[in-house]
Image (cartoon, rainbow, N blue to C red):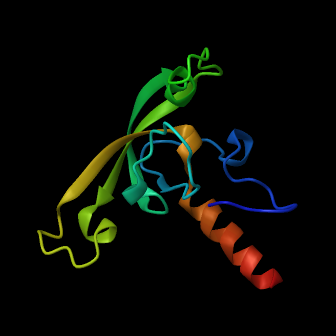
Amino acid sequence: MRLNGDEKDLTSMENRGTLQIGQLVRVDDRSAVGHCRAPWYLRGQVGEIVEVLGVFRDPEKLAYHKPGVPRIPLFKVRFKQSQIWPGYVGSPRDVLEADLTANWLVSALFADRHEKNLSEKV
């Protein structure tokens, strides 16, 4: 979710809150130039955090020979296939799991409230 002007940037870590197992999160739909760790087909999608994998150096910074600090949490996030792919004909129980860093995730509840507030301003 990209914002412009004076709106708060949802991509900043202080606006993400504490992410935890069982929480619904939305993958940021910002565009990325160069190396990034969020597949395009998951951007804007809502999934559930199912595992905290640890805290690691930022792979997007490491890809450009930078130190990769500050370290960021890595989460396993589960998505329903039927929500990712329009017209999906597989089992409704089919899921896709992706390992995503916290800088690509925002609480789905926070993102939905923020979008609603922005639309009410228009």
Disc count in the image? Answer: 0
Q: Quadrant of residue 66?
A: top right
Of residue 3 and residue 56, the one placed in the foreground of this image is: 3
Of residue 108 and residue 96, the one placed in the foreground of this image is: 96
| Left or right side of 120 for 70 | left
Query: Height in image: 9 above or below 19?
Result: below
> x%, y% of residue 100?
44, 40
Q: Residue furthest left?
A: 90
**Image point (40%, 53%), residue name:** 48
> x%, y% of residue 57?
54, 20
Query: Height in image: 93 above or below 16?
Result: below
Query: Height in image: 8 above or below 17?
Result: below
| Left or right side of 34 for 121 | right
**Image point (75%, 75%), residue name:** 117
Query: Height in image: 117 above or below 73?
Result: below
Q: Quadrant of residue 54?
A: top left
Where the C terminus falls, by quadrant? bottom right
| Left or right side of 42 for 10 | right
**Image point (32%, 57%), residue name:** 79
Q: Quadrant of residue 45?
A: bottom left
| Left or right side of 77 for 80 | left
> x%, y% of residue 35?
49, 36
Where the N terminus falls, by quadrant? bottom right
> x%, y% of residue 76?
36, 40
**Image point (71%, 43%), residue name:** 12
